[in-house]
Every structure is written in C-alpha cells, then in structure tokens.
Image: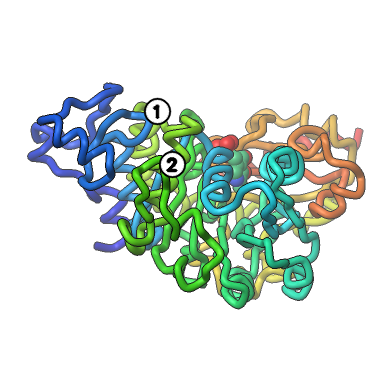
Amino acid sequence: MEFETIAAHGFIDLQKQNHAVSAPIYANTAYSFDSVQHAIDLFDLKTGGDIYSRLSNPTNDIVEQRIAALEGGVGALTTSSGMSAALIAILNIAGAGDEIVSSAKIYGGTYNLFNKTFKQMGIKANLVNTDNIEDYEKVITEKTKCIYAESIGNPSIKIADMEELAKLAHKYGIPLIVDNTVPTPYLCRPFEFGADIVIHSTTKYLSGHGNAMGGIIVDSGKFDWEKSGKFPMLTEPDESYHGIIYTKEFKNAAYIAKTRAHLVRDLGCCQSPFNSYLTYLGLETLHVRMDRHCENALKLAQYLENHPHINFVKYPYLKSSSDYAAAQKYLKHGASSLLGFGVDGDGTKFIEALKLFIHATNLGDVRSIITYPAGTTHRQLSDEQLIAADISKDYMRASVGLENINDIIEDIDNAIKISRK
Ligand SMILES: Cc1ncc(COP(=O)(O)O)c(C=O)c1O
C-alpha cells in the first residue's frame, strides 16, 4: 500500500474490533491469561501478546505498526513523549562509561538531556556544532555507541547530511539515530539514507492537533548488532529474562524488542492509549496537512525574503537557502512548517503584536505558532552555546499552520510595522 493508504487504513482488523471503523481505545491496564503456561510463555517472551499496558496495548499497537510502516521499519515502540523516545533510544544501547556523538543543532530539551542528565548518568555526549563530517569523526572513540542528529533541526532548521552521517557511523560499527519529528515520514524517510533508528515527538505533526503528548522509536531492522560486536546488551544474555539473547530471539527486531521488554518495563514511560488514539486520528490526515503546512510556509518564506525589515529568512525550500541542495535531496514534497527569521525591529513588540500566531513553544499544530528561542526554549543556553546552536538573539521561529495564507501574511506584516514604532 502507498503512504496515504497506510495512513488511512493500515493495521486495522475490523472483524477483531466488532466492525468499528475507527481504532478502539483499550483503556485497560491488564490482560487475562489463558492458562499458567500461557502466562509463563508471555513472561519469558516466548510468545507474543499483551500482559500489562505499561509494556504493550492494542491501541498503541495500531499506531506503532502504522508509523513503522510509514517509516519503512520493522517495529516501533510508543512512549510518553518525544523526550522519553530519545532517552530510551539511547539507553537501549549505551550505559555508564559509554559515549555518544550528536549534532549540537538539536532541540534544546534533547541538548539538555545529553549535556546534563546523561553526564549525571555517566554517559558522555560529544556535541558537534559544525556541519563537517570530519568534526563528527574526530570525536568518535572506542566507547562511542551512536551518532544522533535531527533530520531538520529545531530550531536551527538545518538539514542533517544523513547519508554521510550513516556512512561514518557504519564505518565505526555504530548506528545512526535520527529524530525525524519535523519532516515526518511523509517528507523524509531517514532509513532510505542509511539511518538505523528513527525517533519522533508524535506530539507534533504526527498527531497534528496540539492535543496529545507522545513519542515513538522506530527500528529499521537493518543494523547488524552481532557483527558490530559493540552491543553486549543486545547480543549477550539478559538475566532479567532468564538469559534470553535479544539478537537470537528477535533477529532483526532485537533492538525494538529490547526497548519494550527492558526499558519501558523499568522506566515506565509508556504511551497513554488515549493519546495513541488521538495520534491515530492525526495520522489519517498527515499527508494532507503536511502539504498545506509546506505550501503556507514556502509562501510566507518567499514573502519575508522580499520584506525590507526582515534581517534574514531560513527555509530550506528557498532557492537562496544554503540548505537548498540538501532539501532537494532529502525532502520530498516540501520542507515542513518550520521557518526562521530575524525582525529588524523590537522583538518583544513584534511577538506581542501578533494576533493570529500563538506565542507558545510548540510546532506542527494546525494553528500558526511563534516561538522566541533565545527567550524561551533555549534560555538556559550560554551565548556560546546559542551560537553553536545557530540561534541569534533576534531569531524568531514560526511553525506555519493551516490557516489562510493571506491572514498569516497580514498578521506578520502588521506585527513588523508595530515592532518598528
Ligand atoms: C525535534 C524535537 N524532538 C523532540 C522533542 C521533544 O518532544 P516532546 O515535547 O514530545 O517530549 C521536541 C519538542 O519540541 C522537538 O521539537
């Protein structure tokens, strides 16, 4: 099935759900066992099935299968938020004494997770603030367990060179993990460029309505953990499951099986089935919404590019963008709704004069949203770190919504005028 058809129909079994045409919300926590042997087999991971909703849930399962198919992966795990998806994706293969290499041009929350919390946990994050592949290579050591990047950085709006990063990661026998939140699989499928694991904040475009926190991890099933030899957590016996070896038991779905069996079991950051249901509803219209997000964002970017009181515009589908060639390579149909610009006026007056744009820290919502990173999401970063993350003090990040483009432009235009009074 093609993308749009999977989004609307994928992995629904009408017979199994009393012919209800939409996914049911399974709100229960526990599942009954057929027999003691059935329970033993489930607990020993010898048979598939639900035990307890922290581990798996049929509503979550539909969303997991749908997103795995849309990304072209072998399996997925829903989590409580995008942050817990990033956390689990890395803890699944790295522990105290290990290191990771990541782009520094990433979401501020993820930056903090790597730079502060991972440090406390004994995992060293080497954050690279250039786009040069050689700079990534320089900080890879024997202890490095993955390379991490955002396909389109938030709020830097920088496209990662996933093909080159994947080649580098594979040269050192480690996977490339890509946060694909901003383009979504409709615009970009990182597995096609060599990435091994994809994560998302489903809070954004995948659910799309700004009403459900969530995250997901998708496994491409292509990384050879045994051949690498660097991942004993996957290739050596797990005592908490009577010595099973994930790569032997689950073959190419070993990575994703372990995220569920080990980490979501122990950390408890599971997805609420109600939020999964809302994400499921959002997925049905993902392609239609993304087309309109891209169309509106490009029109606004083109308008701002010719505006006399705009210092700069960042949008990868602008021909003048330094990322234009990368956008043509990595992004089908468009460059999503994130757009950055600098106003030649008073930033506070500009933000407060907007009437249609909502001043908030979110993106991928049907409504247009404006964020002022240096004053909010990236407030805790030092001047040096702000430069590394490509954020100037006048930087405004817009997530262009689905409203009429004339109203969007009029709102911005009016706020620019007020910012200069
Ligand atoms: C690119 C990106 N990844 C991850 C996250 C974290 O997601 P969540 O807010 O769902 O925890 C965000 C949040 O803004 C984000 O923009």
Mark 2 closeness class: few <14, some 14–19, many ≥20 residues within 10 Å: some
State the image coordinates of residue 238 (x, y, percent, origin top left).
42, 48
State the image coordinates of residue 349 (x, y, percent, origin top left).
84, 30
Residue for point 9% across, 35% down: 19
Residue for point 68% across, 70% down: 319
Nearer mark to the viewer, of 1 and 2: 2
Marks 1/2: CA distance? Answer: 18 Å
Where 24 sits versus 187, above or below? above
Quadrant including the C terminus:
top right
* Residue position for label 1: 272
Residue for point 65% across, 30% down: 358
The type of residue carrying mark 1 is Ser
Picture disc at residue 262: 2
Where disc 1 sits, the SS reads: loop
Task: Depth check: give the residue in front, 398 or 409.
Answer: 398
State the image coordinates of residue 281 (x, y, percent, origin top left).
34, 37
Snapshot quadrant of residue 119: top right
Which badge, 1 or 2, is on the more N-terminal residue? Answer: 2
